[in-house]
Amino acid sequence: MAFVFLFCLGVAMAWKWYQLSKAPSDRPLRSVTLCLTCAAASYPVAMPGGATGLDTVAGHGAAKVAQNLLLLATVYFLMCFYLCAAADERRGRRRARAEAALVLVVGTAITAAAANVPHRELAGSFATTDMRVWQVAFFYAAAGVYLMYALTVAGLWTRRYARLSMRPHSTGLWAAGAGMVGMATACAMRAVIVAARWRGAAVSDSVLLCVALILVCSSLLFVVGITYPGLRTRLSLCRLWLRHRREHARLEPLWLLMTEAAPHVVLKTDSRSRWDHWRARGVHRRHHRRFVECRDGLVEISPYLESNPQSDAVSPETNVDRVVAEQLRAAVYSRRSGVPTNAPTRPTLPGLRSREADMQELLALSDALSSTN
């Protein structure tokens, strides 16, 4: 579970940084990116190896302080996302400054409490730390209450935006909102546990395990909700890439015939740099170029096509595309002999005059040419 969460968090953070590099002035995107970055940075600090190393260098309890400060920054930037996206920009900035002041106060308070904690009292985990030490109880309670507040507010805003959004964004927002509610619930339960243990009450390991499981699952659901719209868009683009790749290969028989008859229809791919040359070899560009070249080739050989194909002589069982394919071969042969039969016209492909309809007709002709070889 932890590995899956870390993997999803890393992928989400890398994707947001990539998007931010394309739009560095996008303030809501910058807030989400910083939110995920702080969350990802807090995870290695919480690991046993990272915590031990940081405590060794900076002193006992430093890893716990760093982890909680990063979590405070995570939820603060999460709130900033909604404040930056607010309709009233001035009010959103004013609220963001107020929230920044609050998180600085909380961060300073828990840091001061951790600095006054007796030796090694913060070195343990939440389940093993002695909460009867008031500095330790204050450290966990203050951080937990602020996390609960920020996650609750952000969850309510997320729910509001989810109602106004369309799929797939609404699906991602609902999932992220549910994750925030789950994390806020876990923080509230931890605050109750801190208060009970501070007063000397014992809390069973099963309750602590349940709270930890809720926190991990909610965090995973939150990360999945944030990345879901972008992931779905990427999957759609991958399907389009595969489709264009297949269509490019299917058009090859027709393209070879057209370029053999009229080599000048092949579009030049002059590039001034290696980057332009690499982009010109992309699947989508090669797909569009082959489509245009096939269309131009059909225009070139149209004077050599029969003006009135003998469609009446064709039986219903005969494949019309194969008949047209044979006519195309005859037209190429006539062009070689230099005896046109008609004036140049656009190819008379049946169906709607849209690009998609033309592409389907070209694919059918190319398949017919391939089957009659």
Image: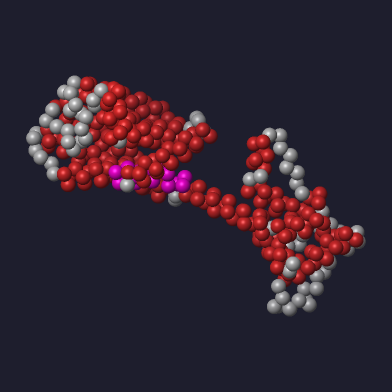
From the viewer's perspective, tell me whether residue 38 is left or right of residue 281: left
Quarter of the view holding residue 120: top left
The chief SS type of the magenta part is helix
Residue sitting farthest toward the left: 200
Q: Which residues are magenta?
A: 216-231
The colour scheme applied to this rendered structure is secondary structure
Task: Check the picture and name the quadrant holding the C terminus.
Answer: bottom right
Quarter of the view holding residue 358: bottom right
From the viewer's perspective, tell me whether residue 100 is left or right of residue 341: left
Residue closest to the eye, 359 or 256:
256
Looking at the image, residue 345 lies above or below residue 231: below
Residue 24 visible, this angle: yes
Residue found at x 17% / y 47% = 206
Residue found at x 43% / y 37% = 13
| Residue 117: in magenta span | no
From the viewer's perspective, tell me whether residue 127 is left or right of residue 304: left
Looking at the image, residue 174 lies above or below residue 120: below
Residue found at x 37% / y 35% = 40
| Residue 225: in magenta span | yes
Residue 179 visible, this angle: no
Q: How many marks?
A: 0
Q: Percent position (x, y) of residue 299?
A: 79, 56
Residue closest to the eye, 87 or 139:
139
